[in-house]
């Protein structure tokens, strides 16, 4: 299956934005969920890195996301993953929590990048890092796509553990997203300590704290 999907996609993302800078791709997972932390990853790939299967994590099967994670962790120059819990999400909103997670993932890198490639259109400057926001960057640059794979798989692993504590919400299936099944469970059983209390306030959740 891995080989078949590899051949089917048969395309390569861009490996870098600049010719000579050390670049780290950054992306998050779990921003649109009703519960659980938001995870972010930062990845520095060698310029020789090539993998035709690599793409936005949402466009790849679960099986192949985990296969790619092994490749990324083996071949990356450096990578790091960071999570921000629902309590902080409720305090500063999901957008700011997503940015905070990416910033902290960057801080954990064993190699300091000279440029950050950020998936999306919003970020905040910190520690004098240069950055470039790229809409749908996880479908354009390999390092951002790699970050999306790590953030997604690490968050999925976390939600599988939470599922053992609260199996009635089916987090092993929906990973905390607002499926009809998840919403019905919330109506029946209420919210857990892992649910985001402020999720419904959409305008506040998307405001940037500058």
Image (cartoon, helix red, strand yellow):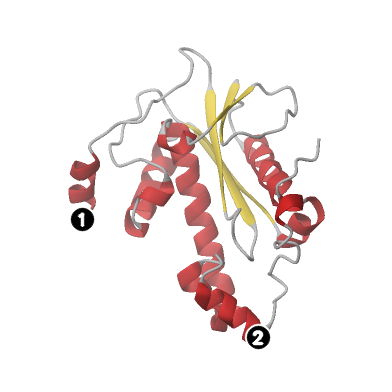
Is residue 133 shown above or below 30? above
Hey, which residue is sitting farthest top in the picture?
19
Asked whether residue 166 is in view, the answer is: no
Q: Identify the image quadrant of the C terminus.
A: top right
Q: How many labels does the image show?
A: 2
Is residue 168 shown above or below 200? below
Residue 189 disc label: 2
Q: Measuring 28% from the left and 37% from the top, which residue is drawn there?
A: 52
The percent coordinates of residue 147 (x first, y second) are 50, 41
Q: Nearer the viewer, residue 4 or 164?
A: 4
The percent coordinates of residue 133 (x first, y second) are 58, 29
Which structural element holds mark 2? helix
The mark closer to the camera, 1 or 2, is 2
Callout 2 crowding tier (Cα within 10 Å): few <14, some 14–19, many ≥20:
few
Which structural element holds mark 1? loop
Hey, which residue is sitting farthest front in the picture?
203
Whole-number angstrom distance, CA of label 1 to CA of label 2: 39 Å
**Considering only order in the chain, which callout, 2 or 1, is on the residue closer to the N terminus?**
1
Q: Identify the image quadrant of the N terminus.
A: bottom left
Q: Which of 46 and 116 is in front in this view?
A: 116
Q: Measuring 56% from the left and 67% from the top, which residue is drawn there?
A: 178
Q: Which of 5 and 190 is in front in this view?
A: 190
Horizontal side of residue 184 vs 94, given as left or right? left
Mark 1 vs 2: CB contact within 8 A? no
Horizontal side of residue 167 vs 55, given as left or right? right
The percent coordinates of residue 3 (x first, y second) are 19, 48
Q: Which residue is label 1 attached to? A: 1
Q: Measuring 35% from the left and 29% from the top, which residue is drawn there?
A: 49
Q: Measuring 60% from the left and 51% from the top, which residue is drawn there?
A: 39
Asked whether residue 31 is in view, the answer is: yes
Horizontal side of residue 23 vs 56, given as left or right? right
């Amino acid at each position: 299956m891995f080989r078949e999907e590899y051949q089917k996609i048969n395309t390569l993302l861009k490996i870098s934005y600049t010719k000579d800078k050390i670049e780290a791709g950054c992306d998050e997972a779990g921003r649109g969920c009703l519960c659980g932390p938001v995870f972010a990853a930062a990845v520095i790939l060698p310029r020789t890195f090539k993998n035709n299967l690599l793409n936005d994590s949402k466009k790849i099967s679960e099986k192949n996301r985990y296969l790619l994670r092994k490749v990324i962790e083996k071949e990356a120059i450096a990578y790091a993953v960071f999570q921000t819990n629902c309590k902080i999400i409720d305090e500063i909103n999901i957008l700011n929590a997503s940015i905070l997670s990416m910033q902290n993932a960057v801080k954990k890198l064993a190699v300091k990048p000279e440029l950050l490639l950020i998936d999306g259109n919003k970020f905040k400057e910190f520690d004098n890092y240069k950055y470039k926001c790229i809409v749908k960057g996880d479908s354009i640059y390999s390092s951002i796509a790699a970050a999306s794979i790590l953030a997604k798989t690490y968050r999925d692993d976390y939600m599988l553990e939470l599922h053992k504590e609260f199996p009635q919400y089916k987090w092993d299936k929906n990973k905390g997203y607002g499926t009809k099944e998840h919403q019905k469970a919330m109506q029946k059983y209420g919210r857990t300590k892992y649910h985001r209390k402020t999720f419904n306030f959409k305008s506040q959740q998307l405001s940037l704290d500058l």
